[in-house]
């Protein structure tokens, strides 16, 4: 009896280890950008950090700029608890020069207590389709092979959510201007990203934010000394940007939560979503008016 229990325990330990290592630690500052600062902020960032050589926080660095476009479809449960809990689950398409470069599914868990670090789990998009599998008809699960669907289900357990309960929520289009920063060895250490985010439907709400993010793989695998060196760099960039653009404000809300709040508080969006009921009400009122008019005549 002991041997089967040992085998079962080993299998569970291996499974837990596999899933636990599937995520990466994401350490970033998210800065809300005033609309009037967007152009000047990007020009400043390019001049300071988009150079072939510069020194900052005791490090010799170089930066390279790039522009890409992302189309993101966000998923939530019916009560919107993902948005409320700063959880993001999205299907992302990444484009450069009009060409699709990559697709993936990303699950981002809530931030740590300091609102800087969160876990990100990535899933590859599967091109295979099985029309006999009910999951292939689900708006999100159809993109995942069965093993990744199981892995997603595992990570949703602490959230008390079944994958089948996920629903499409919002679609965003964003223009991403990014500076990739590497150290003197050429190894990636951080990115500075300016995102101009737009809701992909009426009333086309939009905002801009800048993300100062440490390389996920390097940060996840780093020891305490290396992590301090990386966080010191991020802090130095944030301080320098804030000194030059005082309207920058730290806003760690996820892109999904920020846009969902904009939409939920938008009169135009609410009106658009309820057009059918509005037209029905107008028709009902007109019918009642003509009925009463005929009765009086």
Image (cartoon, grey):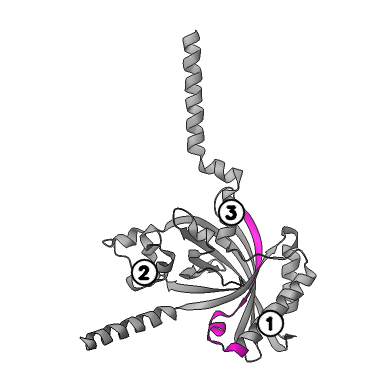
x%, y% of residue 60? Answer: 70, 89
Up the image or down, 213 lies above or below 267; here it is below
Q: CA distance from mark 1 to mark 3?
A: 32 Å
Secondary structure beneath dot 2 equals helix
Query: Mark 1 highlights which residue?
Result: 233
| Residue 213 forms part of the magenta stretch | yes
Residue at the farthest bottom position: 185
x%, y% of residue 197? Answer: 61, 60
Number of marks in the image? 3
Circle 3: is it few (<14), some (14-19), or many (20+) Cα within 10 Å?
Answer: few
Asked if residue 182 shows in the view, the reply is no
Up the image or down, 123 lies above or below 35; here it is below
* Image: magenta residue range: 206-225
Q: CA distance from mark 1 to mark 2?
A: 37 Å
Asked if residue 120 shows in the view, the reply is yes
- The residue shown at (60%, 63%) is 253
Image quarter where the N terminus lies is bottom left
Along the line of sight, the residue nearer the viewer: 291 or 5: 5
């Amino acid at each position: 009896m002991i041997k089967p229990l040992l085998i079962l325990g080993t299998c569970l330990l291996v499974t837990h280890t596999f899933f636990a290592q599937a995520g990466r630690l994401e350490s970033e500052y998210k800065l809300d950008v005033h609309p009037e600062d967007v152009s000047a902020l990007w020009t400043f960032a390019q001049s300071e950090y988009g150079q072939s050589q510069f020194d900052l926080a005791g490090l010799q660095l170089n930066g390279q700029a790039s522009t890409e476009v992302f189309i993101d479809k966000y998923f939530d449960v019916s009560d919107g608890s993902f948005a409320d809990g700063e959880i993001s689950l999205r299907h992302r398409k990444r484009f450069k020069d009009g060409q699709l470069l990559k697709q993936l599914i990303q699950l981002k868990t809530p931030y740590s207590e300091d609102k800087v670090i969160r876990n990100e789990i990535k899933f590859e998009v599967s091109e295979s389709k099985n029309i006999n599998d009910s999951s292939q008809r689900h708006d999100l699960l159809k993109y995942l092979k069965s093993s990744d669907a199981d892995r997603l289900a595992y990570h949703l357990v602490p959230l008390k959510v079944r994958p089948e309960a996920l629903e499409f929520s919002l679609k965003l289009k964003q223009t991403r201007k990014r500076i990739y920063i590497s150290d003197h060895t050429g190894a990636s250490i951080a990115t500075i990203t300016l995102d101009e985010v737009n809701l992909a439907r009426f009333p086309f709400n939009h905002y801009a934010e800048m993300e100062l993010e440490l390389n996920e793989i390097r940060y996840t695998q780093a020891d305490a000394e290396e992590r301090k060196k990386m966080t010191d760099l991020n802090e130095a960039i944030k301080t320098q940007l804030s000194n030059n653009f005082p309207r920058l404000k730290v806003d760690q809300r996820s892109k999904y939560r920020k846009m969902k709040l904009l939409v939920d508080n938008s009169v135009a969006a609410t009106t658009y979503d309820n057009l059918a009921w509005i037209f029905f009400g107008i028709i009902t009122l007109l019918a009642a008016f003509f009925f009463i008019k005929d009765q009086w005549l």
